[in-house]
Image (cartoon, grey):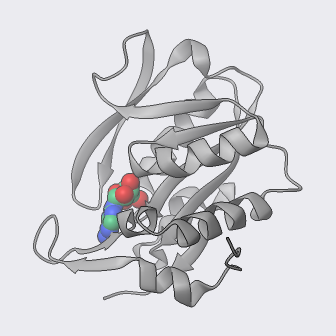
Amino acid sequence: MMQQRFDVKVLDQAIKKVPNFPKEGILFYDITSIFINPPVYRMVIEEMLARYQDQRVDGVVAIESRGFLLGSCFALERQVPMVLARKKGKLPRPTIGRSYSLEYGNATLEMHQEDLLPGRHWLIVDDLIATGGTLDAVARMIEESGSYVAGIFSIVGLPFLNYAKKIGQYKPITLIDYHGE
Ligand code: AMP
């Protein structure tokens, strides 16, 4: 199969924009349409790998649930461990957790405490950065565990929601940005 070179227009076309979901006034960027399109899925993963190829990454922290589908490909290819940041109550072993506010509502994420090995540089992966609250919560958990944030990766960025104020110090990388609705 021919490898699709990274093309932001191809990525834009693959992302479905759904107005008023999950509630009135929110434009939802649905990236699940990437996963039904293998060449675009591969293009995204290859670009993600390329962006971090010269950077130390000891492990991936992937955020439920769309972050899992990016983090797992990256972690396997780089041969580093992946820790899942899951919604409250899903993980069976002792966890660390943190609550935070979303663009719409509140949430709590948890990780298996013993898996988040200290002294490592973790790349945090999610599908979209809106306010940055989710990634900020995960970054704090990583730092409180005595580890470091290697970076933050997301397919989509919504910079007009000012996420740089919260997580700019972690140098977030996004493959496409949208500037309002
Ligand atoms: P935030 O914590 O505000 O950065 O929100 C990020 C999380 O909420 C990500 O896990 C996204 O999947 C989801 N999310 C927030 N806003 C949107 C949006 N407009 N479209 C799609 N997903 C969103």
Q: Residue at x 52, y 58 (%)?
A: 166
Q: Quadrant of ligand 1?
A: bottom left
Q: Position of residue 58 (x, y in %)?
A: 77, 35
Give the left or right position of residue 79, taking residue 61 as reference: right
Q: Position of residue 179 (x, y in %)?
A: 43, 87
Is the N terminus in the top left, top right, bottom left or bottom right quadrant? bottom right
Q: Is residue 95 above or below residue 22?
A: above
Give the left or right position of residue 81, taking residue 103 as reference: right
Residue 2, quarter of the rendered image: bottom right
Is residue 13 among the parts visible in the rendering?
A: yes
Q: Is residue 29 above or below residue 32?
A: below
**Total tally of numbered discs in the picture:** 0
Q: Nearer the viewer, residue 149 or 8?
A: 8
Q: Residue at x 84, y 44 (%)?
A: 56
Q: Nearer the viewer, residue 139 or 70?
A: 70
Residue furthest front in the image = 1
Q: Residue at x 54, y 85 (%)?
A: 10
Residue 64, quarter of the rendered image: top left
Q: Is residue 103 above or below residue 114?
A: below
Residue furthest top in the image = 93
Give the left or right position of residue 54, taking residue 58 as reference: right
Residue furthest left in the image = 24
Q: Residue at x 70, y 29 (%)?
A: 147
Is residue 173 among the parts visible in the rendering?
A: no
Q: Position of residue 171 (x, y in %)?
A: 69, 61
Is the C terminus in the top left, top right, bottom left or bottom right quadrant? bottom left
